[in-house]
Amino acid sequence: MSRLTARHWVFDMDGTLTRAIHDFDLMRRTMSVPAGIDILDYLNALPRDEAERHFQWLRQYEYELAEQAQPAEGIHDLLSQLLEQGVTLGLLTRNMAPLARLTLERAGLSGFFPDETLLGRDDAEPKPDPDGLNRLASQWQVAPSSLVMVGDSIIDVMTGRAAGAYTVLMHSDDEEAQALADLSVTTADALIARLGRRA
């Protein structure tokens, strides 16, 4: 039986549920984050005053992007089909939860994710730490290994694997991430097609 029959799915947000618009080069330049170093890890290691100054800029930047959020092509149909099939949905993002809610609202996706199943970097250790997946699994009273984790980056895949979840990579041409994921699809429609033959 396919692992796509799982009853609990967790989605990344930016670039997965919504169209990717983050300019990570701009973020690194503005906050002086060296290449190859995780942005959140770098900021959290800075002295408190310096870190807070950068986080203030980051929150404003993320707010501006949230206001512009648009749904990824086919994602509404995918989420609707999963709900029709009795799947419980969760969201795990490295963004802040309030901005994630704003993003979903602007993208017309807020109805799919109750507040209690939306976790941001202020609710759990940021991905790729599996803390967020473990928290959702505990909330749903299921094993983390029974989850499906869907995202667009190798960080999402690493997070899912660390929790023992089934990993689906979507909207990514990253060959390393594709090799690591349990399933790689180019679009939400391609994943919908897989759901049609998942039994």
Image: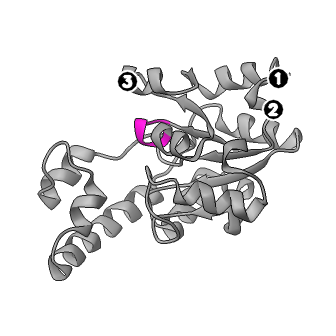
Horizontal side, residue 179 vs residue 3: left or right = left
Cα separation, mark 3 vs mark 2, equals 26 Å
Where disc 3 sits, the SS reads: helix
Amino acid bearing label 2: Thr
Q: Which residue is mark 2?
A: 5
Question: Counting residues from the N terminus, which is met first, the one under dot 1 or under dot 3?
Answer: 1
Q: Which residue is mark 3?
A: 176
Most frequent secondary structure within the magenta stretch: helix
**Which of these two is toward me, 198 or 144?**
144
Find residue 118 and report its horizontal and vertical position in percent.
Answer: 62, 62
Colour approach in the figure: one colour
**Which of these two is toward me, 124 or 163?**
163
Q: Is residue 82 above or below residue 42?
A: above
Magenta range: 152-156
Cα separation, mark 2 vs mark 1, equals 8 Å
Crowding at dot 2, Cα within 10 Å, few <14 / some 14-19 / many 20+, comes out as some
Q: Which residue is mark 1?
A: 1
Amino acid bearing label 3: Glu
Cα separation, mark 1 vs mark 3, equals 26 Å
Amino acid bearing label 1: Met
Question: Counting residues from the N terminus, which is met first, the one under dot 3 or under dot 2?
Answer: 2
